[in-house]
């Protein structure tokens, strides 16, 4: 399994527009963050999690041969507004691309982007997608995917476990019963917005505490704001915990 971090930033990305702070003006590429997303490539399938507004740029930097499916965590703008860029893969693959999400995500996508979910012939001028509602384990070309229920403030969203990797972005609370689903991980990818507490995202301290309880082999934090300077913040992390960065690639069994 190959996991690529297409983007690791918060909803505004980093640098922020018209911000002149140390991080936003940094020459260190690890402080330059597109909106958060990953790709997962296995022998069975190639999938991406979320379609950020930066998707075109992300896939020019990190080319994929095809996209077999998209998994959606939730329907906030920074996670869905790149959906139109799936059109190029429809043109290349000459087939509809299935997009997976819970009922609230699918309802939002099919309302906002109704033109992408037609039943007729493929239209090369539009994305051509198939909506798939999920509320339990499902498979994509025999690749098993386990949805994981998380809380994003007061909103219930989804993380995803694929093999021994789990992706949990935009989380402020992990329900007690979910920890069982996150046992025996080689890699945990987990939200860590900033050092200061936030109502809808884990702070770094909260993320570290959750990661210590889950006890994955390695934990990579994601969805960082411009309040995280990569090098300085990395030095404070416990062993086997890391701040991810755009373009980071992991090769897992």
Image (cartoon, grey):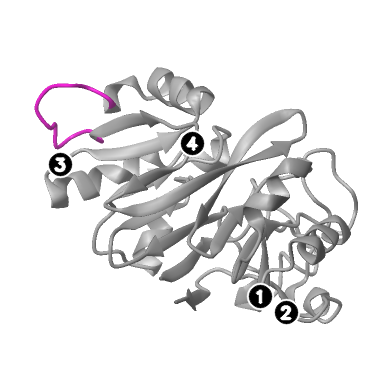
Q: CA distance from mark 2 to mark 4?
A: 30 Å
Mark 4 burial class by Cα count in 10 Å: few <14, some 14-19, many 20+: few
Question: Which residue is denoted by mark 1 in the rendering?
Answer: 217
Q: Is residue 162 rendered to the left or right of residue 87?
A: right
Residue 121 painted magenta = yes
For the residue pair 105 and 35, the one nearer the viewer reads as 105
Sooner in the amino-acid sequence: mark 4 or mark 3: 3
Of badges 2 and 4, the one in the foreground is 4
Mark 3 burial class by Cα count in 10 Å: few <14, some 14-19, many 20+: some
The dominant secondary structure in magenta is: loop
Q: Quadrant of the N terminus?
A: bottom left
Which mark identifies residue 136?
Answer: 4
Marks 1 and 4: CB-CB under 8 Å?
no
Question: Which residue is denoted by mark 2 in the rendering?
Answer: 240
Sooner in the amino-acid sequence: mark 1 or mark 2: 1
Q: CA distance from mark 3 to mark 1?
A: 38 Å
Question: Which residue is denoted by mark 3 in the rendering?
Answer: 95
What secondary structure is marked by label 2?
A: loop
Marks 3 and 2: CB-CB under 8 Å?
no
What secondary structure is marked by label 4?
A: loop
Of badges 3 and 1, the one in the foreground is 1
Q: Which residues are magenta?
A: 117-127
Marks 1 and 2: CB-CB under 8 Å?
yes
Residue 54 seen in this snapshot: yes
Residue drawn at point x = 58 percent, y = 55 percent: 167
Q: CA distance from mark 3 to mark 2?
A: 41 Å
């Amino acid at each position: 399994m190959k996991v690529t971090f297409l983007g690791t930033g918060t909803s505004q990305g980093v640098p922020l527009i018209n911000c002149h702070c140390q991080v936003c003006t940094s020459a260190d590429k690890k402080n330059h963050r597109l909106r958060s997303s990953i790709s997962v490539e296995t022998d069975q399938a190639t999938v991406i999690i979320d379609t950020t507004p930066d998707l075109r740029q992300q896939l020019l930097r990190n080319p994929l041969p095809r996209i077999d499916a998209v998994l959606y965590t939730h329907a906030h703008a920074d996670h869905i507004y790149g959906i139109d860029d799936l059109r190029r893969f429809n043109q290349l693959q000459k087939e509809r691309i299935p997009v997976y999400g819970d009922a609230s995500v699918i309802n939002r996508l099919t309302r906002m982007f109704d033109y992408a979910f037609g039943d007729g012939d493929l239209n090369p001028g539009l994305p051509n997608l198939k909506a798939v509602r999920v509320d339990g384990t499902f498979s994509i070309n025999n690749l098993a995917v386990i949805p994981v229920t998380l809380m994003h403030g007061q909103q219930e969203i989804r993380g995803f476990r694929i093999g021994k990797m789990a992706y949990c972005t935009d989380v402020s609370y992990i329900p007690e019963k979910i920890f069982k689903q996150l046992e025996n991980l080689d890699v945990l990818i987990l939200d860590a917005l900033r050092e200061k507490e936030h109502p809808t995202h884990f702070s770094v301290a909260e993320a570290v505490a959750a990661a210590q309880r889950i006890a994955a082999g390695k934990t990579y934090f994601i969805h960082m704001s411009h309040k995280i300077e990569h090098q300085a913040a990395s030095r404070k992390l416990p062993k086997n915990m890391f701040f991810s960065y755009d373009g980071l690639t992991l090769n897992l069994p």
